[in-house]
Every structure is written in structure tokens, then in C-alpha cells.
Amino acid sequence: MTDSIPALPASDWPTLLPGWVWLCGAGPGDPGLLTLHTLNALRQADVIVYDALVDAAILDWARPEADLVYAGKRGGKPSAKQRDISLRLVELARAGRRVLRLKGGDPFVFGRGGEEAQTLVQHGIPIRIVPGISAGIGGLAYAGIPVTHRDVNQSVTFVTGHDQSGLTPTSLNWKAISDGSQVLVIYMGMKHIAQIAGALLDAGRAPSEPVAVVTEATTPSQRVLETTLERLEADLAASGLEPPAIICVGRSVLMRQTLDWQAMMSGEAPRDTDPLGRERPAESA
């Protein structure tokens, strides 16, 4: 598969040096969403430490001589301890290896990349950060849901559905979040969906507010549940959907009615409605 990818231009591409660690985002799933800087890192690294959500096809682009080290990190399932992963990166760099730490989505968006980078810097290891497309943006785009639309929202808030203990974050002020943002994008929230939905309803969000749950985002197995806040828990339980998932709360979910581009690619017509209730333009004669 490596031979099918055109060569990168030789000039101006950064070099991954021995003893360095690059923390790179692999994107939300689809290998085509990988950045060129991360592809460049894959072609140089001596060792690649990768997370569970990194598509296997992405690893096919690594140097044949590279060592692949699985680091787990999948919510709700057995995973390597974060401190062990961070110290392993230090150990590999000190051994003079060119290290690529490959993380799903963006390493600095609920990806613990900041923690790993801190540990590396504290141990004197030079680093480079390569952002990736976060599932909270790219995954929703693949579902036909824009996180911002000027006719819908001028604010969006990204929150996590659980903290270090695995529980719903007690530090989150759901009332303030609800009042301050028209659209909410919730990562890792399926496990505690009853508490989250209840907190948002208690905070004053309308029971009829649109909600979408996107699982296996940007992959061939992607599924999308469209529901409302008051029906979210029951509909999610009946759907059989499994994490990982992105949950979007707000009127931008309605845009999927006309922007479900994957359905259109499959030959389906857009739903015969204007999700924003606007008058449709008159058809030209």
C-alpha cells in the first residue's frame, strides 16, 4: 500500500531526528483525513506508538523497518496506564529512536496529548506537535452536521462525558454550558448519557432539542442516530449503538436533513424539507 502513495516533495519537509518524539493526530478514522505532516512522520519513524482508534490502513504507510507498539487507550476497555505510555516514550527517545506517537483525532483534543507532551518535556525530550482532525468536527461533517452555521449558531462548546475516574465530570457547570452555547459536542458520553441528558434538561434545554449520535465516525461502519434530548436515553438504548461516539446537541443537527452527503452519494435524495424553516427560493423557469 505504501507504493500507491505519491512521494512527498523533498524540500521544506521537517526531519524526524533521533531522540525526538512527534505527537501526531491520525484523524477520526478515515485514512484519507491524515495530514501530510503525519504521513511524513510515518515514513521516517523508527518506532510508532499508536492508539486503538488508529485505522490499520494508516499503519501500512509506515516504514517497513518501523516497530509498531500498540498503546490501547480506548474508553471503557482495558488500556495501558497513561503514565506507563508516557515513560515508554521517554525510554524510546533516550535510546536514540525516532519516535512517532500516533493518536486518534487530534492529540490535544481530549486525547491526553498534553499530558504526554508535558512528561516528555519534563524529561528533556524534544517534541513536535502535529494536529489532526478531531472527531467532534470531522466526524460530524461526515454525518452532514456542521458544528457552526451562521443561521443556526454563533457558539459551540466541546465537552467530555467522563473524567479521569470514568465518571461524569463533576467540574462541569452544565447550567452555564447550556446557557452559554447553542450547540454542544460531547465526546465519550455514551456511558453516562442518562446523567448528561438529565443535566441538560434540568439546565433548561428544550426536551424537543435535536440530538445526533455518531458512532464509528468517518469509517465504513459509521452509524448516525437522530433523536431529541428527551428521547435520547431510550432511543440510544434501543439502537444498539456502541462507542466510540460523538454526541451533538443543538439545531445544527437539523442540517443533516439536507447535508447528508453520504446518503446522496448512495443515490438517496435530500429530505424534502428546509430544516431551518426558511422560504425556499422559487425554481427558475
Image (cartoon, rainbow, N blue to C red):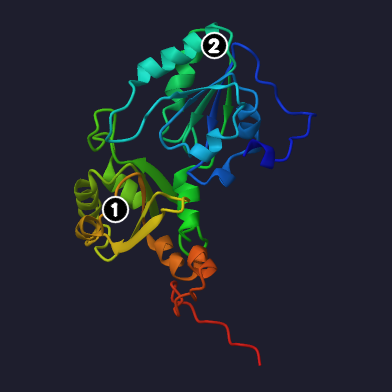
Q: Residues within 10 Å of mark 2 (few under 14, many from 20)?
A: many
Residue at (65% x, 15% y) in the render: 17
Q: CA distance from mark 1 to mark 2?
A: 39 Å
| Above or below for 255 versus 173 | below
In the rendered structure, the answer to whether residue 168 lies left or right of residue 183 reads: left
Q: Is residue 261 above or below residue 279?
A: above
- Give left or right: position of 284 versus 262: right
- Count the marks: 2
Please give the name of the residue rendered at 46% of the width and 66% of the height, measured from the top-left corner. 255
Asked if labels 2 and 1 touch by Cβ distance under 8 angstroms, the answer is: no
Q: Is residue 191 above or below residue 97?
A: below
**Residue 241, numbered circle:** 1
Name the amino acid, label 1.
Answer: Leu
Residue 82's x, y, as percent?
36, 21
Residue positioned 48% across, 15% down in the render:
89
Q: Earlier in the sequence, mark 1 or mark 2?
A: 2
The label shown at residue 18 is none
Closest to the observer, 89 or 140: 89
Q: Amino acid at mark 2?
A: Ala
Residue bearing the label numbered 2: 93
- Secondary structure under the numbered disc 2 in the rendered image: helix
**Among all residues in the image, which is located at the extreme right?**
11
| Residue 166 visible, this angle | yes
State which quadrant residue 253 falls in.
Answer: bottom left
- Mark 1 lies on a secondary structure that is loop
The spot of residue 232 in percent (x, y) is 24, 58
Q: Which residue is more in the foreground, 66 or 266?
A: 66
Q: Position of residue 269 (x, y in %)?
A: 49, 76
